[in-house]
Amino acid sequence: MPTGQHFLDGVRVLDITGALAGPYCTTILSDLGAEVIKVEPVDGDSLRRRLVGPEQQPLPFDLIHRNKRSLAVDIKSDRGREVVTALAMRSDVLVENFRVDALARQGLSYDDLKEDCPNLVYCSISGFGQFGPMRDAKGIDLVAQAYGGLLSVTGSAGGDLAKAGYPIGDLGTGMWGAIGVLAALMRARAGLGGSHIDVSLADTIAGWSLWEVADSVGTGQAPAPLGTAHRLVAPYEAFTCGDGDMLVIGVTERSWRTFCAVLDIDLSGDVRFEREYDRFVNREQLAELLQSRFSTAPRDTWIDLLREAGVPCGPVNTIPQMLNDSQYAARGMFPSDVERFGHRRIVNTPLIADGAPRAQRNAPAIGQDTVALLSEVGIGDQEIRALLRDQVVGSAAGKTSAADSEADPA
């Protein structure tokens, strides 16, 4: 288990984000040891109201805002902006995913802050980026998947298009934001000043189109959906086994003969499958042949045989199967710790190292840390009570001072 000093000990991140891409970026940073301050409206982030299950729990918010502190503040008010600016001056990183120029109208853009915060790493996450003809367009995960070409190549061959099952535009952009922040922190720590990081959902999706661009440039045609098949290699797809369960395989040139031996099929004299390129060109005929063979035994039997022979393969798990898988349990991917997280499962950051504490505690209540954070920037109890009274800030459990004193009835 990770021990010792955390990678981002001493790094403070101001998280002025909503939805998924921005919060995922800051969750990665928090799981690497940074202190993350979640800035949200006085009535709470809208994701808190997205409830799931019969018990109507705010699981989406809890999963993406673990480890963080909460400051509930009205950033549209003058005094609210002053509070956020004071915190920015005491922070190393600010992450935002508002529409382009939205924070500039609040006096909280990178240009607004860089004079007073010369070493600040400021990360802007948006649908289409901070410049270009689409900069002002609203962008969400599905729009990015469509605009970046992913939707056109996802789905069953000859069937309906399908979006990726996970919101990879949001999650991938959050990862790129975190990567940019880490690189910029290195430069800032070297005394070279802060940076403005600009990442977008559309760029993220387009940036992952490596095989599809190779296919398009090489053939001069627009790639089409292939189901689970690979665009350059075969066999590399899913098959249904004798018990109805599915597995996936990925066979390289090196493992082809071994693979055929495991399946007890002799294709050495079939010119359609002689070379890797031949197998790719004739992948549909090959898939039909392999499907008939996989249908003769249960999935786990095939997986055991293929793994023993060193052929890459694996089951097609459902989400419940994934959550209860022994490999993921050993890796701590879905911890269930009532003391730290309540009766919730956490989706951990998939990075294990001595300096990465990963998930440590549940998401905060609205304004759980407001009073403490205001005190940390030098705001006295009387002014804190005034800010609470005027609803410039909000505090969980009615806390009105660092000492939890009662609010001034006036």
Image (spheres, rainbow, N blue to C red):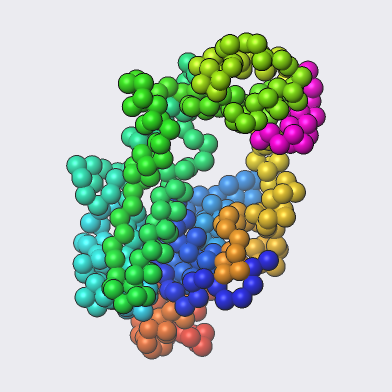
Q: Residue 293 location, x and y as percent?
A: 73, 17
Left or right: 188 as drawn, with respect to 7: left
Residue shown at 61%/61% (left/top)?
Answer: 352
Q: Position of residue 89 (x, y in %)?
A: 32, 78
Quarter of the image with the N terminus is bottom right
Q: Depth check: 215 or 200 in front?
A: 215
Image: 312 above or below 340:
above
The residue lying toward the viewer, choosing from 271 and 113, is 271
What residue do we see at 40% from left, 36% from top?
Answer: 209
Magenta-drawn stretch contains 58? no
> Does residue 302 show up?
yes
Q: Which quadrant of the view contains residue 187?
A: bottom left
Query: In the rendered structure, which segment of residues is drawn in magenta?
Result: 296-313
Residue 5 falls in which quadrant of the image? bottom right
* Residue 167 on image: x %, y %: 48, 42
Q: Is 360 left, or right, of 164 in this rendering? A: right
Q: Position of residue 104 (x, y in %)?
A: 22, 62
Look at 26% across and 43% down and name the residue there: 137
**Residue 142 figure quarter:** top left
- Rendered residue at 52%/36% (across/down): 165
Taking the magenta stretch, the answer to whether it contains residue 300 is yes
Residue 63 against residue 265 in the figure, above or below: below
Which quadrant: the C terminus?
A: bottom left
Is residue 244 at all visible to an observer of this figure? no
Residue 369 sits above or below residue 408 on the image = above
Q: Is residue 156 left or right of residue 17?
A: right
Of 192 and 39, nearer the camera is 192
